[in-house]
Amino acid sequence: MNGNDLLNGIRDKFKDDITNVFEKSETRVYIDITAESIVRFANYLFRDAGARFNIASGTDARDHMEILYHFIVEEINLLISLRVKLDKSKLEIQSLANLFEGANWIEREMNEMLGITFHGHPDMRRLLLSDDWPEGVYPLRCDYKEWDPNAIRDRGV
Amino acid sequence: MGLKINALLKSPWVFHLSTGSCNNCDIEVLDCLTPRFDIERFGMLLAGSIRHADVLLVTGSCNRQSSIRLKEIYKQAPKPCLVVAIGECALSRGMFIHSYNCPVPLDKIIPVDVYIPGCPPKPEAIIAGVVKLIEKVKADKK
């Protein structure tokens, strides 16, 4: 198996779900997919294509929210990034934590930092923020505003 | 107080607390204790518990979760307790001054006696700072 075979296989199997494929280099591919197909995609890459789930990353891209799921197929040295664009009015997606344990904590982090809801997550507690952090305030969003009246933001000089 | 300060200065036991630092300042603090810099020649000894310590060494930028613990630790310390802020983060939060997780600097949470700047400060700077602290306390006593 090489990278082209794998990508052609993915294109055939998921042709309705893929919106764009960007081959950045021989070892790096970005695949834009719809949010509904993420579990099927991850299942195929993880169980059938022998990929390893590396990490996911969430970004606030101002007009939409973006999640990148990074999968590595080590035997052909290919890093596949599945890019899901979420509408800001509907920030929810199916959880992958039941598929592989590695998605558990990063989904908890994305939930508290960006406010994305992951349906079917087994244990959606807070991971990084402090205990007295208010509900519904998401620090890594672009429109985050200082909420703490006691915070001091100058160096006192 | 006079006897207590006298006893404290003879051999100040230090307790090392990291309030969310990148660990580089902590490595420098540990360097001070190793034979190359050997802070024990000034009578300083690393204490395992704040209840045995006279000096509190604080590194890191005091995030929301750890500043509560920091206050608890300071309450548990036997008084008089001297506080030494080590590194840029503990002094002014450094590059984390606008971080959502670091609302107030260390000296607004507990009183600080000596500030040792640097990112990280050299072991020599830490030793110089602690020696200055001892001199300062001696001068105050007179």
Image (cartoon, coloured by chain):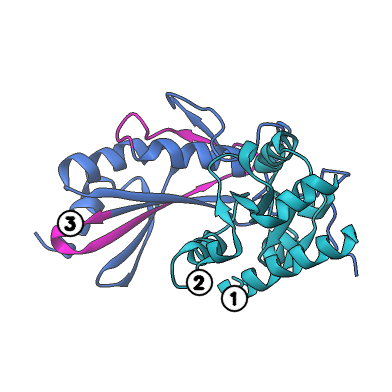
- Asked whether the beta carbons under mark 2 and mark 1 sit within 8 Å of each other, the answer is yes
Q: Which secondary structure lies at badge 2?
A: loop
Do callouts 2 and 1 point to residues on the same chain? Answer: yes
Per the rendered image, the range of residues in magenta is A72-101
- Front residue of A146 and B76: B76
Identify the residue at horizontal 64%, vertical 54% (top origin).
B11
How dense is the environment of label 3, judged by Cα within 10 Å: few (below 14), some, or many (20 and up)? some
Q: Which numbered disc covers residue B137?
A: none
Identify the residue at horizontal 59%, vertical 59% (top origin).
B43
- Residue A143 visible in the snapshot: no
Q: Which residue is under mark 2? A: B37
- Front residue of A128 and B108: B108
Query: Toward which corner of the image does residue B126 lie, by quadrant?
Result: bottom right
Q: Residue furthest left?
A: A1
Which chain is drawn using cyan?
B
Work out how far the residue at label 2 is from the one at label 1, CA to CA, in angstroms: 8 Å
Query: Toward which corner of the image does residue A25 lie, by quadrant?
Result: bottom left
Q: Which residue is under mark 3? A: A6
Which chain is drawn using blue?
A
Chain ID at mark 2: B
B40 on left or right of B68: left
Q: Residue B86, percent across and down?
A: 66, 63
Q: Residue A39, percent across and down?
A: 34, 36
Quadrant of the frame with the N terminus of chain A: bottom left
**Which mark is nearer the camera, 1 or 3?**
1
**Which mark is nearer the camera, 2 or 3?**
2
Identify the residue at horizontal 80%, vertical 46% (top origin).
B3
Picture layout, residue B125 above or below residue A55: below
Q: Which residue is under mark 1? A: B124
